[in-house]
Image (spheres, grey):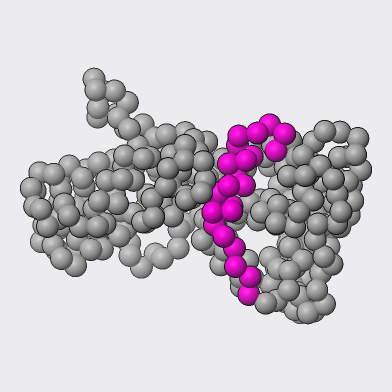
Amino acid sequence: MISTYDKPIPSIPKETARAASASFGRGNFYIQVGEQLDNILGELHWQQSHAQNGGFAMAEDLSLALITLFQFIEGLTDAQASDAMRTRIDWKFALHLSLLPRTLDAVALCRFRERILSHAIEQQGYQVLIDGLVRSVPLLNNRIGLPGSLEIVSLVCSVNRLNQVQQAMNRVLEVLASRFPQWLRAITLPHWYGRYNPSLTRFDGSVLPSQQRLLMEEIASDIHHLLEKVDQAGSREICELCEVKVLNQVWSHLFQAASQAQKNRLETLSIRDCDLCFHEGAGGRHHTGTNH
């Protein structure tokens, strides 16, 4: 983020304004963001000229900052945010984008979050933007208890990690159901039929932040159970499945036993721990078989 301001985004394209006007009312949150964004950025320019807070002089930085907030509000993963930016008129209006399809690099979102989590001045700059939005956008201002920049970013990371582990488990169960159905039926836990339903192609972002750690622990327990059964089966065919190997790597990267003495108590890693992120190009290790 850069501390100078030189209108980092263009005006709302006419075709985007017409499409948004035909589809949404003035009470839509994203319409309000798009209409107020120039005023907010002008206010931020004044604040940044009188303080040493970080700023958003580049269009990419500003877009990533806004998209991260949108992800928090809707509970979206990076992949779902990418789809929204490509297809949704309301997002295009808020971000001052044309109606042409626009790709979004999920790694760039992860890198942005890492910067916020790692540097106090980046957190301050993001908080200034959020505060400006809260003052200028009535629908956001009405959100009681909107957390600070650090917690917003942490919760978006948490949603992505939940999606990552859930999808890894989905893929393993799908291939086992196809190739080893009888063995899988014998070891499947009853709640798996609902939690890992292959027809649910999109992550359920409605999980409340207070429930996310509990859900992560429950999925960790499921993975631990499945991998134990795989080891006990002693089947080389099952162990050598690509999806099983990926699940083992997810387990190694994102979960750990509390201690040898308490090995039955599983402990999830901090949602702020970027060192174990699977995203290529982010702060830590990565794996090409999964998405952060």
Residue 236 lies, with reference to residue 52, above or below; the image says below
Please state the horizontal and vertical placement of residue 292, each as a whole percent of the image. 46, 51
Q: Is residue 178 visible?
A: yes
Q: Main secondary structure of the magenta part?
A: helix
Task: Looking at this view, name the residue that lies furthest to the front.
Answer: 281
The number of discs equals 0
Give the magenta-colored segment's residue range. 101-122
Q: Is residue 66 magenta?
A: no
Hey, which quadrant is residue 216 in on the image?
Answer: top left
137 or 245: nearer the viewer: 245
Please state the horizontal and vertical placement of residue 62, each as a whole percent of the image. 73, 53
59 or 169: nearer the viewer: 59
20 or 121: nearer the viewer: 121
Hey, which quadrant is residue 106 in on the image?
Answer: bottom right
Q: Please name the residue shown 57% across and 60% down the image.
A: 105
Q: Please name the residue shown 60% across and 44% down the image.
A: 113
Q: Locate residue 42 relative to residue 249 in the image: left or right.
A: right
Q: Locate residue 46 relative to residue 218 in the image: left or right.
A: right
Hey, which quadrant is residue 265 in on the image?
Answer: top left
Please state the horizontal and vertical placement of residue 217, each as a whole percent of the image. 36, 39
Q: Is residue 115 magenta?
A: yes
Q: Locate residue 174 relative to residue 106 in the image: left or right.
A: left
Please state the horizontal and vertical placement of residue 54, each as a whole percent of the image. 77, 39
Q: Please name the residue shown 64% across and 39% down the image.
A: 116
Q: Is residue 133 visible?
A: no
